[in-house]
Amino acid sequence: TNSDALNYDQSAILDDESCLFSYSINLHSNSNLISFMVLPDDISVGNVLESIDGLVYGIIGQGVAASPNPTLGWVGSLNSINNEDGYWLKMSSLGILSFLSHDRPGDLNPDYTLNFGANLISFPFDGEYLISETIPTEVMPYITNIIGEGQAAQKDPVLGWIGSLNNLEGSKGYWFIVTEDIEFQFINPNR
């Protein structure tokens, strides 16, 4: 029933949650700091990364990793992908990671639980948004730095967020440095 779905049927009158949405991430060679706004039903590493098989030679999460083995498939401590985490994806050349999902990209907003120190997390919304507009005010004092791929921001008590990172973007991963354990959901400026 959703006109944005790949399998939209204008004669459908009942939402049976069978809509399928296409999701893709453009990747460059070497290391990409990414996250997933949606996932397919099968969240195993091999299934999620199937569209870039042969181009990807490793994936690293916070404290976990996996790499493809020609005989054994994906090996390592990372077995499945989730929406809350960020990942370093190591590519031998450029490629496009793509799959179908029952969830529309940008509609999910998971709960994040961050521990003291560095946390590699996702950003759940489609598009780019100012850091100050997406983080709830009650947890803002505990976040001191945000590091993305090739850019970073530090919170200054007077100037606010300073550095080369101004916006958080969907499908990108970020290291959030926090001074104590926090739980939150990102604020979606579009709602």
Image (cartoon, rainbow, N blue to C red):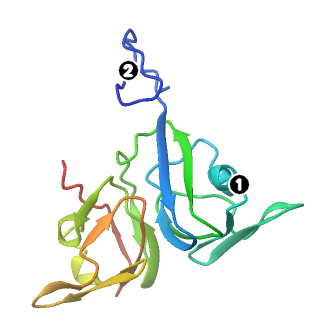
Rendered view: 98 above or below 7: below
- Determine which quarter of the picture holds residue 29: bottom right
Rendered view: 42 above or below 155: above
Residue extending farthest front: 93
Q: Residue at x 67, y 73 (%)?
A: 65
Label 2 Cα crowd, 10 Å radius (few <14 / some 14-19 / many 20+) = some
Q: Residue at x 46, y 61 (%)?
A: 84
Contact, mark 2 vs mark 1 (Cβ under 8 Å): no
Check the picture and name the quadrant holding the N terminus: top left
23 relative to 109 in the view: left or right: right
- The image position of residue 99, as x and y in percent, is 56, 44
- The image position of residue 11, as x and y in percent, is 38, 8
- In this view, the residue in front, 17 or 11, is 11
SS assignment at label 2: loop
Check residue 1 in the rendering and tell me which mark sits there, or answer none: 2
7 relative to 79 in the view: left or right: left
Q: Residue at x 68, y 49 (%)?
A: 47
> In this figure, which residue is indicated by the disc labeled 1?
46
- In this view, the residue in front, 47 or 6, is 6
- The image position of residue 9, as x and y in percent, is 42, 15
Q: Residue at x 22, y 82 (%)?
A: 141
Rendered view: 53 above or below 21: below
Label 1 Cα crowd, 10 Å radius (few <14 / some 14-19 / many 20+) = many
190 relative to 158 in the view: left or right: right
SS assignment at label 1: helix
Amino acid marked by disc 1 = Gly
60 relative to 159 in the view: left or right: right
